[in-house]
Each structure stands twice: as structure tokens, then as C-alpha cells.
Image: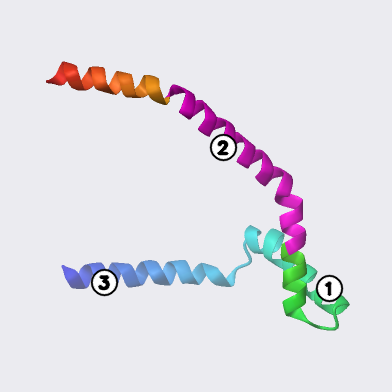
Amino acid sequence: MKRFYLALLGFAALLLLAGCQSRSGFEQYFVDPFASLIHFTAFLFSGSYGIAIIVLTLVIRLVLAPLMMKQYMNQHHMRKKMELIKPEMQNTEEIERNKRS
């Protein structure tokens, strides 16, 4: 039985890795444009790929900053709401504990 599962795992790995040779939509629409952008940015910085990656990382972070701030503010508001209802939740839990005993 163990040999069967090992063979099945090997077959699944073979099928999974066989698909790596074809160009997927992810590679075509995400990987290739980012690779081109990194090559172009490295060209601007005298072929330094390290600086190109750092610059592109900072640009992406700056673009996503408004979304991250909105998420942070939503979390902050939710935390404040939870602090307001915490005493009521504790009272409800105490009542439930007393009912069970």
C-alpha cells in the first residue's frame, strides 16, 4: 500500500511539473512585464539589478500605501468598537457560565 501511494505521489509530481514548460497566463501577464521592468530599471542604474529591485520595491510600496493605510484605519476602528463592547461581552459570558453551573 505504501508503494502505491509513493507511485501516486510520483505520478502527481510528474503531471504538475510537466505543466511548467507551457507559458501560463500568470507568467505572460505578471512575470514577463516585471522582468522587463527590472531589466529596464537596471539599465538606468548602469546594470545594477540590486538597485533596480530596491527601487521597484519602493515604487510598489508607494503605490500600495493608500490601500495599506485604509486597511490600518479599518483595523483601528474595529479595535475601538471591540473595546466598547468588551464589557458587555464579558457580562454575557458570565451569565452563560452561571446558567451552565
Identify the residue position indicated by label 1 in the image.
Answer: 40
Q: Amino acid at mark 1?
A: Phe
The quadrant of the rendering that contains the C terminus is: top left
Check if residue 70 falls in the magenta segment.
yes
Left or right, residue 96 beside residue 88: left
Identify the residue position indicated by label 3 in the image.
Answer: 6
Q: Are marks 3 and 1 in contact (CB under 8 Å)?
A: no
Residue range corresponding to the magenta coloring: 58-85
Where residue 44 sits in the image (x, y, percent)?
A: 87, 76
Q: Secondary structure at mark 2?
A: helix
Where residue 93 sits in the image (x, y, percent)?
A: 28, 23
Q: Earlier in the sequence, mark 3 or mark 1?
A: 3
Q: Earlier in the sequence, mark 2 or mark 3?
A: 3
Q: Amino acid at mark 3?
A: Leu
Q: Residue at x 77, y 68 (%)?
A: 55
Question: Which image quarter: residue 24?
Answer: bottom right
Q: Earlier in the sequence, mark 2 or mark 1?
A: 1
Identify the residue position indicated by label 2 in the image.
Answer: 75
